[in-house]
Image: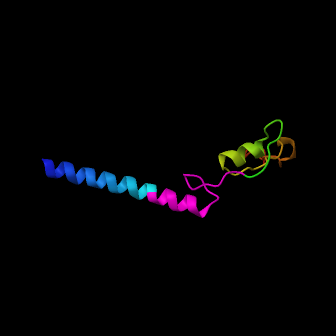
Amino acid sequence: MATALYVGLGIAAAAFFGRAGLVAIRRSRGGTNALGRAFYKGGFEAKMTRKEAALILQTKYVELRSISSAPPILFATEA
């Protein structure tokens, strides 16, 4: 019983200190935070735009066209 407890504690300690070591290595390289992602470098607008929100959330910003400029859709009954 005690052996299983010591093995479990050893594995948990190794995982914790291994993760801490990886974070320390990433931080020493510079330009990244604890999760390994760099912050958005630049100023902010007075009112947040969709592009700025996409940069903060680290998602891809795609500007959509308006519906009026889209080509018409033909249905099978209209052909």
* Residue 21 falls left or right of residue 60: left
Residue at (15%, 52%) from the top-left corner?
3
Residue 14 versus residue 28: which sits nearer the camera?
A: 28
Is residue 22 shown left or right of residue 43?
A: left
Colour treatment of the image: rainbow
x, y percent for residue 22: 47, 60
Which region of the structure is painted magenta?
Answer: 21-40
56 displayed left or right of 1: right
Q: Position of residue 27 (x, y in %)?
A: 56, 58
Q: Work out whether residue 15 or residue 73 is closer to the camera in this orientation and state it.
A: 15
Number of numbered discs overlaid on the protein picture: 0
Q: Is residue 36 magenta?
A: yes
Image-based side of 41 in relation to 25, left or right: right
The residue depicted at 69 percent of the width and 46 percent of the height is 56
Q: What is the x, y in percent for residue 44?
A: 79, 43
Q: Residue furthest left?
A: 1
Location of residue 58 in the rendering, given as x and y in whole percent from the top left corner: 66, 50
- Whether 77 is drawn above or below 3: the answer is above
Residue at image x 55%, y 52%? 35
| Residue depicted at x 75% and y 50% | 62
**Residue 77 in magenta stretch:** no
